[in-house]
Image: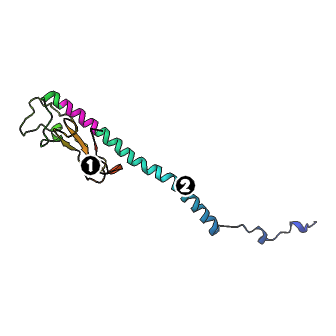
Amino acid sequence: MRHNKNLNLTYTSFKLKVGYTLIEIMIVIAIIAMLAGLVLPKVMGRADDAAKVAVKQDIATISSALKLYRLDNGRYPTTEQGLKALVEKPSAVPTAKNWKDGGYLEKIPKDPWGNEYQYITPGIHSDADIFTYGKDKEIGGEGINADIGNWE
């Protein structure tokens, strides 16, 4: 049997490199951080936009229910009766003589931050103002903290 010296390789020459070096790991982390820096601000801004859209939809729904209430009863519920008059027949004066059985809404929605919508009649901006104070729950503000109402 002929023996070729070139084929006589030792085990040590076949050792495989297992694991990653510190520099390789740092490069991967840096790439992930750069990608997160580009993507996260765009995704985070979408949540705020979605909250504003939800508020506008809720206000439109409440506004439609108030218009139906006014058609049936000749006036909007008073500020004291509030939006609750859309769900339960008001017992306070002035009473709703033609209040629709089942109400005008199943339930009064809350804004995306868990707060009740505000209702004032007569309103400052219209016959009946429906609004939320925004995320910060305070009058005024900018961006996501701005007041959002049916006058916008």
Q: Answer whether residue 60 is magenta in the image.
A: yes
Return the residue nearer the eye: 28 or 117.
117
Query: Which of labels 2 and 1 is toward the front?
Result: 1
Quarter of the image with the C terminus in it: top left
Residue at the spot 12% in from the left edge and 41% down from the top edge: 81
Residue extending furthest toward the front: 124
Residue extending furthest toward the left: 93
| Secondary structure of the residue carrying numbered label 1 | loop
Within 10 Å of the Cα at label 2, are there few (<14), some (14-19), or many (20+) other Cα atoms?
Answer: few
* Residue 80 in the figure: left or right of residue 146: left
Question: Can you tell which mark lies on residue 45?
Answer: none
Question: Where does label 1 land, which residue?
Answer: 133
Return the residue nearer the eye: 112 or 16.
112
Q: Is residue 108 above or below residue 9?
A: above
Question: Where does label 2 land, which residue?
Answer: 35
Kindly identify the amino acid type of the residue bearing the numbered disc 1: Tyr
Most prominent secondary structure in the magenta stretch? helix
* Residue 69 in the figure: left or right of residue 144: left
* Residue 20 in the figure: left or right of residue 64: right
Residue 99: name its quadrant: top left
Residue extending furthest toward the right: 2
Q: Position of residue 45 (x, y in %)?
A: 42, 49
Segment colored magenta: 59-68
Within 10 Å of the Cα at label 1, are there few (<14), some (14-19), or many (20+) other Cα atoms?
Answer: many
Kindly identify the amino acid type of the residue bearing the numbered disc 2: Leu
